[in-house]
Amino acid sequence: MRTRLLVIGLSALLCACTLAPRYETPSSPPVAAYKEAGDWMPAAPADAQPRGAWWEPFADPKLNELELALQAGSQDLRVAVARYEQSRAISRRAFSDVFPTVDAAGSAVRGSTSANAPRSGGVSTPGNDYSAALDFAWEIDLFGRLRSASHAAHSRAQASAGDYAAVELALEAELAQDYFSLRGADATARLLDDSVKAYDRAFELTRNRYHGGIAAATDVDQAETQRQNARAQLASVQLERAQLEHAIAVLLGQPPGNFTLEAADFTGEPPAIDAGLPSTLLQRRPDVASAERAVAAANAEIGVARAAWFPVFSFGAVGGYEATSSQAWFEAPSRFWAAGPAAVIPLLDAGGRHAGNKQARAAFDEAVAHYRQSALVAYQEVEDNLAALRLLAAELKADEAAAASAQRSAYHADKRYAAGVADYIEVTSTQTAALQAQRSALDARVRRMNAAVALVRALGGGWTAQELDHPALVDKGAGE
Protein backbone atom coordinates (compact mmCIF):
# COMPACT_ATOMS: atom_id res chain seq x y z
CA MET A 1 0.00 0.00 0.00
CA ARG A 2 2.80 2.39 0.85
CA THR A 3 4.54 1.64 -2.47
CA ARG A 4 1.32 2.39 -4.35
CA LEU A 5 0.85 5.69 -2.55
CA LEU A 6 4.48 6.63 -3.22
CA VAL A 7 4.09 5.94 -6.95
CA ILE A 8 0.86 7.94 -7.09
CA GLY A 9 2.49 10.83 -5.24
CA LEU A 10 5.55 10.88 -7.48
CA SER A 11 3.34 10.77 -10.60
CA ALA A 12 1.30 13.71 -9.31
CA LEU A 13 4.45 15.71 -8.68
CA LEU A 14 5.87 14.98 -12.14
CA CYS A 15 2.60 15.99 -13.80
CA ALA A 16 2.19 19.21 -11.84
CA CYS A 17 1.34 22.21 -13.95
CA THR A 18 3.75 25.00 -14.70
CA LEU A 19 3.08 28.64 -13.90
CA ALA A 20 4.00 29.90 -17.37
CA PRO A 21 1.10 31.53 -19.27
CA ARG A 22 -0.45 29.48 -22.04
CA TYR A 23 1.57 30.29 -25.11
CA GLU A 24 0.00 31.59 -28.32
CA THR A 25 1.96 32.79 -31.32
CA PRO A 26 1.77 36.60 -31.43
CA SER A 27 -0.42 38.04 -34.14
CA SER A 28 1.22 39.74 -37.10
CA PRO A 29 -0.20 42.34 -39.49
CA PRO A 30 -2.63 40.61 -41.90
CA VAL A 31 -1.53 40.84 -45.55
CA ALA A 32 -3.79 39.48 -48.28
CA ALA A 33 -1.48 40.00 -51.25
CA TYR A 34 1.82 41.60 -52.20
CA LYS A 35 1.20 45.10 -53.53
CA GLU A 36 4.26 45.06 -55.81
CA ALA A 37 3.68 41.65 -57.36
CA GLY A 38 1.56 43.03 -60.18
CA ASP A 39 0.70 40.77 -63.09
CA TRP A 40 4.07 40.79 -64.83
CA MET A 41 5.33 37.50 -63.36
CA PRO A 42 4.28 34.13 -64.84
CA ALA A 43 2.11 32.06 -62.55
CA ALA A 44 3.64 28.99 -60.94
CA PRO A 45 2.26 26.36 -58.56
CA ALA A 46 3.24 26.63 -54.92
CA ASP A 47 5.18 23.37 -55.03
CA ALA A 48 7.57 24.98 -57.53
CA GLN A 49 9.12 27.04 -54.75
CA PRO A 50 12.89 26.55 -54.52
CA ARG A 51 13.83 23.92 -51.97
CA GLY A 52 17.32 23.23 -50.77
CA ALA A 53 19.65 24.32 -53.56
CA TRP A 54 17.62 27.43 -54.45
CA TRP A 55 20.40 28.77 -56.69
CA GLU A 56 20.11 25.96 -59.25
CA PRO A 57 17.23 27.61 -61.20
CA PHE A 58 19.72 30.35 -62.15
CA ALA A 59 21.32 27.68 -64.36
CA ASP A 60 24.95 28.66 -63.82
CA PRO A 61 27.22 25.63 -63.24
CA LYS A 62 30.00 27.75 -61.74
CA LEU A 63 27.61 29.31 -59.24
CA ASN A 64 26.42 25.81 -58.26
CA GLU A 65 30.05 24.80 -57.69
CA LEU A 66 30.78 27.85 -55.55
CA GLU A 67 27.66 27.40 -53.42
CA LEU A 68 28.67 23.83 -52.61
CA ALA A 69 32.18 25.02 -51.73
CA LEU A 70 30.60 27.58 -49.39
CA GLN A 71 28.90 24.83 -47.40
CA ALA A 72 32.21 23.07 -46.87
CA GLY A 73 34.55 26.00 -46.25
CA SER A 74 32.73 29.01 -44.81
CA GLN A 75 34.07 30.01 -41.40
CA ASP A 76 31.00 32.18 -40.73
CA LEU A 77 28.88 29.07 -41.22
CA ARG A 78 31.06 27.14 -38.78
CA VAL A 79 30.51 29.91 -36.21
CA ALA A 80 26.73 29.59 -36.68
CA VAL A 81 26.92 25.80 -36.33
CA ALA A 82 28.95 26.11 -33.12
CA ARG A 83 26.43 28.55 -31.65
CA TYR A 84 23.60 26.18 -32.49
CA GLU A 85 25.41 23.26 -30.87
CA GLN A 86 25.96 25.37 -27.74
CA SER A 87 22.26 26.18 -27.51
CA ARG A 88 21.36 22.50 -27.93
CA ALA A 89 23.74 21.55 -25.12
CA ILE A 90 22.21 24.23 -22.86
CA SER A 91 18.76 22.85 -23.66
CA ARG A 92 19.81 19.32 -22.77
CA ARG A 93 21.37 20.57 -19.53
CA ALA A 94 18.19 22.41 -18.53
CA PHE A 95 16.11 19.29 -19.31
CA SER A 96 18.36 17.14 -17.12
CA ASP A 97 17.69 19.40 -14.11
CA VAL A 98 14.12 18.05 -13.95
CA PHE A 99 15.40 14.60 -12.98
CA PRO A 100 17.13 13.32 -9.84
CA THR A 101 20.91 13.16 -9.61
CA VAL A 102 22.99 10.40 -8.11
CA ASP A 103 26.66 11.00 -7.22
CA ALA A 104 29.28 8.61 -5.90
CA ALA A 105 31.96 9.87 -3.53
CA GLY A 106 34.89 8.25 -1.84
CA SER A 107 37.85 9.37 0.22
CA ALA A 108 40.69 7.98 2.30
CA VAL A 109 42.05 10.60 4.68
CA ARG A 110 44.60 10.51 7.50
CA GLY A 111 44.78 13.50 9.80
CA SER A 112 45.24 14.75 13.30
CA THR A 113 43.04 16.88 15.54
CA SER A 114 44.33 19.97 17.30
CA ALA A 115 45.38 19.49 20.92
CA ASN A 116 43.95 22.93 21.66
CA ALA A 117 40.58 22.26 20.03
CA PRO A 118 37.45 22.16 22.20
CA ARG A 119 36.90 18.80 23.88
CA SER A 120 40.31 17.58 22.76
CA GLY A 121 41.57 17.10 26.30
CA GLY A 122 44.86 18.69 25.32
CA VAL A 123 45.74 15.66 23.23
CA SER A 124 46.48 15.63 19.53
CA THR A 125 45.07 12.41 18.15
CA PRO A 126 46.00 11.17 14.68
CA GLY A 127 43.56 8.93 12.84
CA ASN A 128 42.17 7.62 9.58
CA ASP A 129 38.80 8.23 7.88
CA TYR A 130 37.73 5.96 5.05
CA SER A 131 34.43 6.90 3.37
CA ALA A 132 32.42 5.71 0.35
CA ALA A 133 28.86 6.87 -0.30
CA LEU A 134 26.09 7.39 -2.85
CA ASP A 135 24.32 10.76 -2.74
CA PHE A 136 20.79 11.09 -4.15
CA ALA A 137 19.25 14.53 -4.71
CA TRP A 138 16.00 15.58 -6.36
CA GLU A 139 14.31 18.97 -6.53
CA ILE A 140 10.61 18.17 -6.71
CA ASP A 141 9.36 20.51 -9.45
CA LEU A 142 5.96 21.04 -7.88
CA PHE A 143 5.43 24.52 -9.36
CA GLY A 144 7.12 23.92 -12.71
CA ARG A 145 10.18 26.13 -12.27
CA LEU A 146 12.56 23.58 -13.75
CA ARG A 147 10.18 22.54 -16.51
CA SER A 148 9.60 26.17 -17.49
CA ALA A 149 13.36 26.71 -17.61
CA SER A 150 13.68 23.59 -19.77
CA HIS A 151 10.93 24.80 -22.14
CA ALA A 152 12.66 28.18 -22.38
CA ALA A 153 16.01 26.58 -23.19
CA HIS A 154 14.41 24.33 -25.79
CA SER A 155 12.73 27.30 -27.46
CA ARG A 156 16.02 29.18 -27.47
CA ALA A 157 17.68 26.18 -29.11
CA GLN A 158 15.01 26.30 -31.79
CA ALA A 159 15.62 30.02 -32.19
CA SER A 160 19.31 29.28 -32.60
CA ALA A 161 18.43 26.80 -35.34
CA GLY A 162 16.54 29.60 -37.10
CA ASP A 163 19.53 31.90 -36.63
CA TYR A 164 21.78 29.28 -38.17
CA ALA A 165 19.48 28.91 -41.17
CA ALA A 166 19.27 32.70 -41.56
CA VAL A 167 23.08 32.99 -41.54
CA GLU A 168 23.37 30.18 -44.06
CA LEU A 169 20.81 31.77 -46.37
CA ALA A 170 22.45 35.20 -46.04
CA LEU A 171 25.86 33.77 -46.94
CA GLU A 172 24.45 31.88 -49.92
CA ALA A 173 22.71 35.01 -51.18
CA GLU A 174 25.79 37.18 -50.62
CA LEU A 175 27.89 34.71 -52.60
CA ALA A 176 25.38 34.67 -55.47
CA GLN A 177 25.17 38.47 -55.57
CA ASP A 178 28.97 38.84 -55.47
CA TYR A 179 29.21 36.27 -58.25
CA PHE A 180 26.72 38.03 -60.53
CA SER A 181 28.35 41.39 -59.80
CA LEU A 182 31.70 39.87 -60.76
CA ARG A 183 30.26 38.52 -64.00
CA GLY A 184 28.84 41.96 -64.68
CA ALA A 185 32.32 43.41 -64.08
CA ASP A 186 33.69 40.86 -66.57
CA ALA A 187 31.21 42.02 -69.22
CA THR A 188 31.90 45.70 -68.47
CA ALA A 189 35.68 45.15 -68.63
CA ARG A 190 35.27 43.43 -71.98
CA LEU A 191 33.18 46.34 -73.27
CA LEU A 192 35.73 48.88 -72.03
CA ASP A 193 38.64 46.90 -73.44
CA ASP A 194 36.96 46.88 -76.86
CA SER A 195 36.28 50.61 -76.50
CA VAL A 196 39.92 51.32 -75.61
CA LYS A 197 41.06 49.47 -78.72
CA ALA A 198 38.58 51.37 -80.87
CA TYR A 199 39.58 54.69 -79.33
CA ASP A 200 43.26 53.87 -79.88
CA ARG A 201 42.55 53.32 -83.57
CA ALA A 202 40.56 56.54 -83.70
CA PHE A 203 43.43 58.39 -82.03
CA GLU A 204 45.95 57.08 -84.56
CA LEU A 205 43.65 57.96 -87.43
CA THR A 206 43.01 61.45 -86.06
CA ARG A 207 46.71 62.05 -85.46
CA ASN A 208 47.50 60.98 -89.02
CA ARG A 209 44.80 63.31 -90.31
CA TYR A 210 46.32 66.11 -88.24
CA HIS A 211 49.77 65.47 -89.68
CA GLY A 212 48.19 65.47 -93.13
CA GLY A 213 46.65 68.86 -92.44
CA ILE A 214 43.09 67.51 -92.50
CA ALA A 215 42.25 67.53 -88.78
CA ALA A 216 42.79 70.18 -86.10
CA ALA A 217 45.06 69.74 -83.09
CA THR A 218 42.03 69.91 -80.82
CA ASP A 219 40.70 66.75 -82.50
CA VAL A 220 43.86 64.91 -81.50
CA ASP A 221 43.55 66.15 -77.92
CA GLN A 222 39.92 65.09 -77.73
CA ALA A 223 40.76 61.62 -79.06
CA GLU A 224 43.55 61.31 -76.50
CA THR A 225 41.23 62.42 -73.69
CA GLN A 226 38.59 59.95 -74.76
CA ARG A 227 40.90 56.92 -74.85
CA GLN A 228 42.54 57.78 -71.53
CA ASN A 229 39.13 58.18 -69.87
CA ALA A 230 38.22 54.73 -71.15
CA ARG A 231 41.46 53.32 -69.72
CA ALA A 232 40.68 54.90 -66.34
CA GLN A 233 37.20 53.37 -66.37
CA LEU A 234 38.68 49.98 -67.28
CA ALA A 235 41.14 50.15 -64.37
CA SER A 236 38.29 51.05 -61.99
CA VAL A 237 36.21 48.08 -63.15
CA GLN A 238 39.21 45.76 -62.86
CA LEU A 239 39.69 46.93 -59.27
CA GLU A 240 36.02 46.25 -58.51
CA ARG A 241 36.35 42.81 -60.07
CA ALA A 242 39.45 41.98 -58.02
CA GLN A 243 37.72 43.02 -54.79
CA LEU A 244 34.67 40.89 -55.62
CA GLU A 245 36.94 37.92 -56.29
CA HIS A 246 38.63 38.45 -52.92
CA ALA A 247 35.24 38.69 -51.19
CA ILE A 248 34.13 35.40 -52.75
CA ALA A 249 37.37 33.73 -51.62
CA VAL A 250 36.79 34.81 -48.02
CA LEU A 251 33.18 33.62 -48.14
CA LEU A 252 34.49 30.21 -49.23
CA GLY A 253 37.01 30.17 -46.38
CA GLN A 254 40.05 30.53 -48.66
CA PRO A 255 42.90 33.05 -48.71
CA PRO A 256 42.33 35.49 -51.61
CA GLY A 257 45.84 34.79 -52.88
CA ASN A 258 44.96 31.12 -53.44
CA PHE A 259 41.67 31.72 -55.24
CA THR A 260 41.10 32.65 -58.87
CA LEU A 261 37.84 32.91 -60.75
CA GLU A 262 38.36 32.98 -64.48
CA ALA A 263 36.49 35.57 -66.54
CA ALA A 264 33.34 34.34 -68.27
CA ASP A 265 30.36 35.65 -70.21
CA PHE A 266 27.43 37.19 -68.38
CA THR A 267 24.46 35.69 -70.14
CA GLY A 268 22.12 34.64 -67.33
CA GLU A 269 18.50 35.64 -66.89
CA PRO A 270 16.66 35.60 -63.56
CA PRO A 271 14.31 32.62 -63.23
CA ALA A 272 10.59 33.07 -62.75
CA ILE A 273 10.00 33.35 -59.01
CA ASP A 274 6.57 32.86 -57.47
CA ALA A 275 6.31 34.84 -54.26
CA GLY A 276 3.41 32.70 -53.07
CA LEU A 277 0.88 33.95 -50.55
CA PRO A 278 1.90 36.43 -47.84
CA SER A 279 0.31 34.14 -45.26
CA THR A 280 3.01 31.54 -45.89
CA LEU A 281 5.94 33.95 -45.72
CA LEU A 282 6.28 33.83 -41.93
CA GLN A 283 6.68 30.04 -42.14
CA ARG A 284 9.42 30.34 -44.77
CA ARG A 285 11.63 32.96 -43.12
CA PRO A 286 14.16 31.52 -40.65
CA ASP A 287 14.77 34.89 -38.99
CA VAL A 288 11.04 35.35 -38.35
CA ALA A 289 10.78 31.80 -37.00
CA SER A 290 13.74 32.51 -34.71
CA ALA A 291 12.02 35.64 -33.41
CA GLU A 292 8.83 33.65 -32.73
CA ARG A 293 10.77 31.01 -30.79
CA ALA A 294 12.36 33.78 -28.74
CA VAL A 295 8.81 34.85 -27.78
CA ALA A 296 8.05 31.27 -26.68
CA ALA A 297 11.22 31.24 -24.58
CA ALA A 298 10.31 34.55 -22.95
CA ASN A 299 6.84 33.18 -22.19
CA ALA A 300 8.38 30.18 -20.41
CA GLU A 301 10.69 32.49 -18.47
CA ILE A 302 7.58 34.11 -16.98
CA GLY A 303 6.80 30.70 -15.48
CA VAL A 304 10.28 30.58 -13.96
CA ALA A 305 9.81 34.04 -12.43
CA ARG A 306 6.36 33.17 -11.06
CA ALA A 307 7.64 29.97 -9.45
CA ALA A 308 10.09 32.04 -7.40
CA TRP A 309 7.15 33.04 -5.17
CA PHE A 310 6.54 29.44 -4.10
CA PRO A 311 8.46 26.99 -1.89
CA VAL A 312 11.15 24.76 -3.34
CA PHE A 313 10.81 21.14 -2.19
CA SER A 314 13.56 18.60 -2.50
CA PHE A 315 14.35 15.10 -1.37
CA GLY A 316 17.81 13.87 -0.55
CA ALA A 317 19.39 10.62 0.56
CA VAL A 318 22.91 9.50 1.26
CA GLY A 319 24.27 6.11 2.20
CA GLY A 320 27.57 4.30 2.30
CA TYR A 321 30.39 3.10 4.46
CA GLU A 322 32.70 4.96 6.80
CA ALA A 323 35.44 3.55 9.02
CA THR A 324 38.73 4.42 10.65
CA SER A 325 40.41 1.30 9.28
CA SER A 326 40.63 0.13 5.72
CA GLN A 327 40.09 -3.47 6.86
CA ALA A 328 36.69 -2.57 8.34
CA TRP A 329 35.74 -0.09 5.60
CA PHE A 330 33.01 -2.16 3.93
CA GLU A 331 31.86 -4.21 6.90
CA ALA A 332 28.28 -4.01 8.10
CA PRO A 333 28.95 -1.91 11.21
CA SER A 334 30.55 0.74 8.97
CA ARG A 335 27.33 1.43 7.11
CA PHE A 336 25.56 4.77 7.43
CA TRP A 337 22.57 6.39 5.75
CA ALA A 338 20.32 9.42 5.90
CA ALA A 339 17.21 10.39 3.94
CA GLY A 340 14.52 13.02 4.12
CA PRO A 341 12.73 15.91 2.48
CA ALA A 342 13.69 19.56 2.62
CA ALA A 343 11.96 22.81 1.78
CA VAL A 344 12.97 26.39 1.20
CA ILE A 345 10.12 28.85 1.69
CA PRO A 346 10.58 32.41 0.43
CA LEU A 347 9.58 34.98 3.02
CA LEU A 348 11.16 38.37 2.46
CA ASP A 349 13.44 39.64 -0.28
CA ALA A 350 12.71 43.41 -0.39
CA GLY A 351 10.88 43.19 -3.73
CA GLY A 352 13.41 41.02 -5.57
CA ARG A 353 10.87 38.44 -6.81
CA HIS A 354 8.43 41.16 -7.83
CA ALA A 355 11.18 42.81 -9.88
CA GLY A 356 12.03 39.45 -11.45
CA ASN A 357 8.41 39.02 -12.54
CA LYS A 358 8.30 42.51 -14.02
CA GLN A 359 11.56 41.85 -15.86
CA ALA A 360 10.20 38.60 -17.32
CA ARG A 361 7.02 40.36 -18.47
CA ALA A 362 9.00 43.18 -20.05
CA ALA A 363 11.29 40.68 -21.79
CA PHE A 364 8.21 38.95 -23.22
CA ASP A 365 6.80 42.26 -24.48
CA GLU A 366 10.17 43.04 -26.07
CA ALA A 367 10.27 39.64 -27.79
CA VAL A 368 6.72 40.12 -29.14
CA ALA A 369 7.58 43.54 -30.54
CA HIS A 370 10.76 42.16 -32.11
CA TYR A 371 8.77 39.32 -33.71
CA ARG A 372 6.21 41.70 -35.17
CA GLN A 373 8.96 44.00 -36.45
CA SER A 374 10.70 41.00 -38.04
CA ALA A 375 7.45 40.14 -39.81
CA LEU A 376 7.08 43.70 -41.08
CA VAL A 377 10.66 43.74 -42.35
CA ALA A 378 10.06 40.41 -44.09
CA TYR A 379 7.04 41.83 -45.93
CA GLN A 380 9.03 44.96 -46.80
CA GLU A 381 11.94 43.00 -48.26
CA VAL A 382 9.62 40.93 -50.44
CA GLU A 383 7.78 44.04 -51.64
CA ASP A 384 11.08 45.84 -52.29
CA ASN A 385 12.48 43.07 -54.44
CA LEU A 386 9.21 42.40 -56.27
CA ALA A 387 9.22 46.08 -57.19
CA ALA A 388 12.90 45.90 -58.11
CA LEU A 389 12.41 42.94 -60.45
CA ARG A 390 9.39 44.52 -62.12
CA LEU A 391 10.91 47.98 -62.56
CA LEU A 392 14.42 46.79 -63.42
CA ALA A 393 12.93 44.75 -66.24
CA ALA A 394 11.45 47.96 -67.63
CA GLU A 395 14.70 49.84 -66.97
CA LEU A 396 16.75 47.18 -68.76
CA LYS A 397 14.46 47.29 -71.78
CA ALA A 398 14.78 51.08 -71.97
CA ASP A 399 18.56 50.96 -71.42
CA GLU A 400 19.04 48.40 -74.19
CA ALA A 401 16.94 50.51 -76.58
CA ALA A 402 18.93 53.60 -75.60
CA ALA A 403 22.22 51.74 -76.11
CA ALA A 404 21.17 50.62 -79.59
CA SER A 405 20.11 54.16 -80.49
CA ALA A 406 23.34 55.64 -79.10
CA GLN A 407 25.45 53.20 -81.10
CA ARG A 408 23.62 54.18 -84.28
CA SER A 409 24.18 57.83 -83.44
CA ALA A 410 27.89 57.23 -82.89
CA TYR A 411 28.13 55.37 -86.20
CA HIS A 412 26.49 58.23 -88.12
CA ALA A 413 28.62 60.86 -86.33
CA ASP A 414 31.76 58.97 -87.34
CA LYS A 415 30.60 58.89 -90.95
CA ARG A 416 29.74 62.60 -90.88
CA TYR A 417 33.17 63.42 -89.48
CA ALA A 418 34.88 61.34 -92.15
CA ALA A 419 32.86 63.22 -94.78
CA GLY A 420 33.94 66.54 -93.27
CA VAL A 421 30.44 67.72 -92.31
CA ALA A 422 30.80 67.27 -88.50
CA ASP A 423 33.47 68.21 -85.98
CA TYR A 424 35.20 65.79 -83.66
CA ILE A 425 33.26 66.97 -80.63
CA GLU A 426 30.17 65.34 -82.12
CA VAL A 427 32.10 62.09 -82.58
CA THR A 428 33.44 61.97 -79.02
CA SER A 429 30.13 62.99 -77.43
CA THR A 430 28.14 60.35 -79.32
CA GLN A 431 30.73 57.65 -78.64
CA THR A 432 30.82 58.55 -74.94
CA ALA A 433 27.02 58.46 -74.81
CA ALA A 434 27.00 55.06 -76.52
CA LEU A 435 29.52 53.63 -74.05
CA GLN A 436 27.60 55.01 -71.08
CA ALA A 437 24.33 53.59 -72.42
CA GLN A 438 25.89 50.16 -72.83
CA ARG A 439 27.29 50.30 -69.31
CA SER A 440 23.89 51.34 -67.95
CA ALA A 441 22.29 48.34 -69.65
CA LEU A 442 24.89 46.00 -68.14
CA ASP A 443 24.40 47.56 -64.71
CA ALA A 444 20.64 47.06 -64.96
CA ARG A 445 21.17 43.40 -65.86
CA VAL A 446 23.41 42.88 -62.84
CA ARG A 447 20.99 44.63 -60.49
CA ARG A 448 18.13 42.58 -61.89
CA MET A 449 19.95 39.31 -61.19
CA ASN A 450 20.85 40.50 -57.70
CA ALA A 451 17.25 41.54 -57.07
CA ALA A 452 16.16 38.00 -58.00
CA VAL A 453 18.64 36.59 -55.48
CA ALA A 454 17.44 39.07 -52.86
CA LEU A 455 13.83 38.04 -53.51
CA VAL A 456 14.66 34.37 -53.00
CA ARG A 457 16.39 35.30 -49.75
CA ALA A 458 13.43 37.46 -48.67
CA LEU A 459 11.13 34.49 -49.32
CA GLY A 460 13.25 32.22 -47.12
CA GLY A 461 15.11 30.32 -49.84
CA GLY A 462 14.43 26.61 -49.49
CA TRP A 463 13.88 26.75 -45.75
CA THR A 464 10.70 25.76 -43.88
CA ALA A 465 9.72 26.15 -40.24
CA GLN A 466 9.64 22.35 -39.82
CA GLU A 467 13.45 22.42 -39.78
CA LEU A 468 13.64 24.17 -36.41
CA ASP A 469 13.95 20.89 -34.51
CA HIS A 470 16.06 19.15 -37.15
CA PRO A 471 18.17 21.67 -39.08
CA ALA A 472 20.32 20.13 -41.77
CA LEU A 473 23.78 20.56 -40.31
CA VAL A 474 25.41 17.60 -41.99
CA ASP A 475 27.98 18.55 -44.65
CA LYS A 476 27.31 22.26 -44.06
CA GLY A 477 30.43 23.40 -42.33
CA ALA A 478 29.91 21.49 -39.09
CA GLY A 479 33.41 20.09 -39.41
CA GLU A 480 32.55 16.49 -38.48
Image (tube, rainbow, N blue to C red):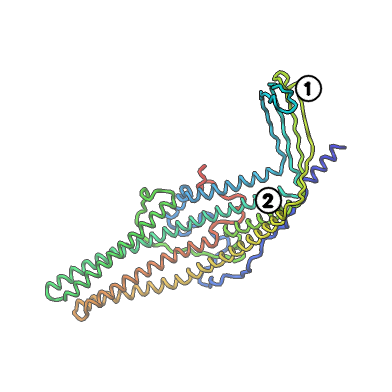
- At 58% across and 52% down in the image, what residue appears? 161
Instruction: Please tell me whether residue 151 is drawn above or below residue 460 in the rendered image.
Output: above
Question: Disc 1 or 2, which lies upstream in sequence?
Answer: 2
| Residue that lies at the very extreme toward the bottom in this rendered image | 421
On the image, the x and y values in percent for residue 447 come to 43, 66
Quickly name the residue at label 1. Answer: 333
- Looking at the rendered structure, the secondary structure element under dot 1 is helix
Residue situated in front as seen by the camera: 134 or 110: 110
Residue situated in front as seen by the camera: 38 or 8: 8
Q: Quadrant of the rendered structure where residue 110 is?
A: top right
- At 34% across and 59% down in the image, what residue appears? 239
Amino acid at the residue labelled 2:
His
On the image, the x and y values in percent for residue 427 come to 25, 75
Nearer to us of marks 1 and 2 is 1
- At 78% across and 49% down in the image, what residue appears? 16
Instruction: Please tell me whether residue 319 is drawn above or below residue 395 in the rendered image.
Output: above
Label at residue 86: none
Amino acid at the residue labelled 1:
Pro
Locate residue 65 relative to residue 298 in the image: left or right: left
**Does the image show residue 423?**
yes
Instruction: Please tell me whether residue 52 is drawn above or below residue 198 in the rendered image.
Output: above
